[in-house]
Amino acid sequence: MDEQLDTTQGWCCDGRTYKEHAAEDGHCCQAEGTQIDDLPADGQAKARERLQSAT
Ligand SMILES: [Zn+2]
């Protein structure tokens, strides 16, 4: 199955993209445009995992 990762608006600290969290809750807990390197270590690990499994 294809997973769509739209990272144009950045990342959430829980490994989702900003867009995914915003779509669910109406907003994301991170600032728009937050990059992986800006996330806490565990968030970075989750985000990179998502990136790897997405392609
Ligand atoms: Zn969030």
Image (cartoon, helix red, strand yellow):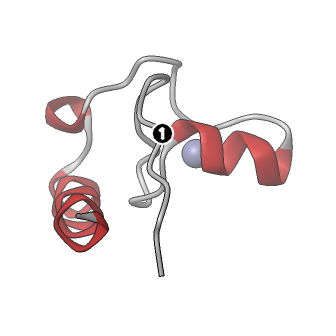
Task: Give the quarter of the image for residue 26.
Answer: top right
**Disc 1 crowd, CA 10 A, few/some/many (<14, 14-19, 20+):** few
Quadrant the C terminus occupies:
bottom left
Q: x, y percentage for residue 32?
A: 52, 18
Residue situated furthest bottom in the rendering: 1
Viewed as shown, does residue 25 lie left or right of 1? right
Dot 1 lies on which element? Answer: loop
Q: Nearer the viewer, residue 51 or 29?
A: 51
Give above or below for 1 relative to 49. Answer: below
Q: Nearer the viewer, residue 6 or 39?
A: 6
Viewed as shown, does residue 23 lie left or right of 5? right
Residue drawn 23% across the image and 47% down it: 40
Q: x, y percentage for residue 9?
A: 49, 23
Viewed as shown, does residue 27 lie left or right of 29? right
Q: x, y percentage for residue 50?
A: 30, 66
Task: Give the quarter of the image for residue 27.
Answer: top right
Give above or below for 24 relative to 33. Answer: below
Residue drawn 46% across the image and 71% down it: 2
Residue drawn 27% across the image and 28% down it: 35
* Residue corresponding to mark 1: 6
Ligand 1 sits in quadrant: top right
Q: Nearer the viewer, residue 2 or 45?
A: 2
Viewed as shown, does residue 15 lie left or right of 32? left
Q: x, y percentage for residue 39?
A: 26, 40
Task: Give the quarter of the image for residue 33.
Answer: top left
Q: Nearer the viewer, residue 38 or 4?
A: 4
Residue drawn 48% across the image and 82% down it: 1
Residue type for callout 1 = Asp
Ligand 1 has an atom within 8 Å of the beta carbon of the residue at disc 1: no
Callout count:
1
